[in-house]
Amino acid sequence: MRKLIAIIVIASITGLITLSFRPETVKKNNYTALPKDSVGSVKAFMSVYTVLKSARCMNCHPSGDAPLQGDDSHIHTMNVKRGVDGKGLYSVRCSNCHQAQNTAGLHMPPGNPKWGLPPANMRMVFQGRTPRQLALQLLDPKQNGGRTKAQLIDHMAHDDLVGWAWHPGDGRTLPPMSRPAFAAQVRLWIAKGAYAPSAKAK
């Protein structure tokens, strides 16, 4: 009986050691590293790109200092400007109209506690960016808010202001895929090597 118990204990310990050192794909900070796959990585990013270029994302990532509005991404009325912190300029602050949550009603002001554009020193422009330009920008800590790849995934998958795009209030078109699907494509893009599309990609 003692011999049987000893064998079971030794087998259990051996199994644990084997699992600890098994050379399999490992979990790396919010994404699972996969074999490098430039084709699969770029394909995943092109799905991500369709969301980032949708009005729900691009309107707050304009090429200029005025936010955009509506499904047609027209320039925000009332001469609203980014300001240093991204929350507006002088007395025209985003929070004057944009509250902590959406205002009820068709096309009423959307809301979130963090409502605003990226700050002036980290503008994170989506508008007018090609897939390659946008991929490289997202991967560059000097342009993405100092985020690592894992932090970039976390931002896109869990940040509540990003999540507003899927709860934009009445009268606004949703992004072309669900947020879980979007987050999965972001993870896949990075897990397969975080490749940027070629300059010819559109």
Image (spheres, rainbow, N blue to C red):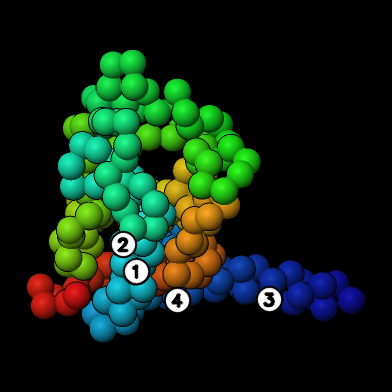
Q: Which residue type carries mark 4?
A: Glu
Circle 1/circle 3 CB separation < 8 Å: no
Separation (CA) of disc 1 from disc 3: 51 Å
Q: Nearer the viewer, mark 1 or mark 3?
A: 1
Identify which residue is drawn at 61% across, 68% down. Answer: 16
Amino acid carrying label 1: it is: Thr
Q: Give the labeled residue for mark 1.
A: 50
Kindly report the distance in space between the C-alpha atoms of the residues bearing marks 1 and 4. Answer: 33 Å
Q: Which mark is residue 24?
A: 4
From the image, tell me which residue sits under label 3: 11
Return the x and y of residue 23 as percentages of the image width and height. Answer: 42, 75
From the viewer's perspective, tell me whether residue 105 is left or right of residue 49: right
Instruction: Name the residue type under label 3.
Output: Ala
In this view, the residue in front, 36 or 131, is 131
Q: How many marks?
A: 4
Q: CA distance from mark 1 to mark 2?
A: 5 Å
Residue with the mark numbered 2: 53
Question: Of label 1 and label 4, which has the lower sequence position?
Answer: 4
Residue neighbourhood size for the residue with mark 4, other residues' Cα within 10 Å, grouped as few (<14), some (14–19), many (≥20): few
